[in-house]
Amino acid sequence: MTLYRAQVVDTPDDPFRGGALRCDGDAGLLVEDGRIVERDAFATLRSRHPEAQLVELSDGVLLPGLVDAHVHFPQVRVIGALGMPLLEWLERCALPEEARIAEIDYARVVAGEFVSALTSAGTTTALVFGSHFAPAVDALFQAAAGHGLRITSGLVVGDRMLRPELHTSAERSYDEGRELARRWHGVGRSRYAVTPRFALSCSDELLASCGELHRDVVGSWFTSHLNENLDEVATVRRLSGTTNYLDCYDRHGLVGRQSVFAHNVHSTDTELTRLAEAQASVAHCPTSNAALGSGMFPLNRHLAHGVLVALGCDVGAGTGFSLLKEGLQTYLLQRLRGVDGVPLTAAHLLYLATAAGGQALGLRDQIGDLSVGRRFDAIWIRPRPGTILDIGIRHSNGPEDALAKVFALATPDDLGQVWIDGAPLRARAVDA
Ligand code: GUN
Ligand code: FE
């Protein structure tokens, strides 16, 4: 048994529904077999368990592990492109790199870089767009298992309007997905997600085979892109003959509680109503939306319809792996939306980066906050002495203010440690 002593900040209750930030200045968390079994004032817990091994984290802040609801594995090396909208960026940056990952040795190297970068940024659980190539997806699951990352991922599929080497067929998509799911779904912390790239690049027949796979792999997740960019939306409408983009997935049984749609910037009310009714989730990716000029996410309309929103970094269109940065960008964007913006506090940002992702991934009983019964997935923000973050936290006006400073200023360098299931991850160099 291990007893952690820390200033613990988390969001067990949804701040969008009136929940408050929970801050315990000198808390004790007792962890056994990776699970939090007791939580109390440190002194109380210490006297109850004098034998427990003590881990002293009193300087800094302990937060739940971050949950990324949308990120692309094969795009690690194309982060940072400027000046292109979605379809041009795909053609010129993302897809050529995604074709390179067919080479398995290259895929293994990139998978290592990807998983290291995620965990170094404090992400302990992620829903990941895999690769168009099954061996590369296998390499990703292997790398994630090696690092202990909680991952839900799958084979990315498309059969039109990509480059030919990325195209598959309905039958091959099903067979390869089924085999990957057999190898990885429910194995350790890995789960399988059926992952058509987006309706633009998938025929109705291919999406039908995705529906079949999603049904046949019991407990599988579903993820894709939705309503990201106006040219994309217009093309999908033309190809599908409907104004309802979501329906391209819905007609094949792909919209449900276990579905996560990235972006949804340009959504109709009909689609939002259906997402809410199906209890599907949306992954908001604010740095990506800004970098590609995709648009200003209507958080107000999602909340008004009751759609669950989580956060994704959307690397490589997004500008890095930090969900703290995505939280800050969510805040800034809502400010820029003026009267249509949702006023956000640090509690909202933390909720979006932790519990909301846990909810979107159906893992809320295990992760998302640091309550008794949850797995000990946690990050210790421990600013380097003398940095502006360090000074800011020490002079902050209470824990919520300190948390706002974390979102404004913290980088992966400020992470003292990351744990998944109670196991500390040694900080690894990106090229390890
Ligand atoms: N839509 C289809 N593929 C992609 C992708 O790789 N990134 C983003 N941002 N949108 C997409
Ligand atoms: Fe994406």
Image: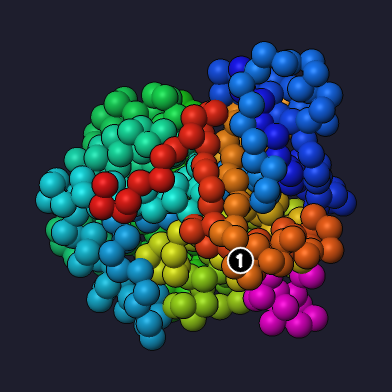
The quadrant in which residue 309 appears is: bottom right
Q: Name the residue under label 1.
A: 386
Q: Which residue is rendered at x = 45% and y = 29% of the image?
A: 189
Q: Hey, what amino acid is under mark 1?
A: Gly
Instruction: Report the front residue among 377 and 196.
Output: 377
Q: Can residue 30 be seen in this view?
A: yes
Where is 364 relative to 82, above or below? Answer: above
Membership of 332 in magenta stretch: yes
Membership of 105 in magenta stretch: no
Q: Which residue is rendered at x = 76% and y = 22% of the image?
A: 46
Q: In this view, does 104 lie to the left or right of 126?
A: left
Position of residue 267 measured from the top left corner of the image (x, y, whole percent): 60, 67
Q: Can residue 374 be seen in this view?
A: no
Position of residue 71 measured from the top left corner of the image (x, y, whole percent): 43, 55
The quadrant in which residue 425 appears is: top left
Q: Is mark 1 on a helix, strand or loop?
A: loop
Most extreme residue toward the front is 386
Q: In this view, does 5 lie to the left or right of 254?
A: right
Q: Which residue is rendered at x = 37% and y = 36% of the image?
A: 147
Where is 220 relative to 110, above or below? Answer: above
The quadrant in which residue 406 appears is: bottom right
Where is 311 relative to 126, above or below? Answer: below
Q: Is residue 12 left or right of residue 312?
A: right
Range covered by the magenta-colored residues: 330-343
Q: Does the residue labelled 1 lie within 8 Å of ligand 2?
A: no
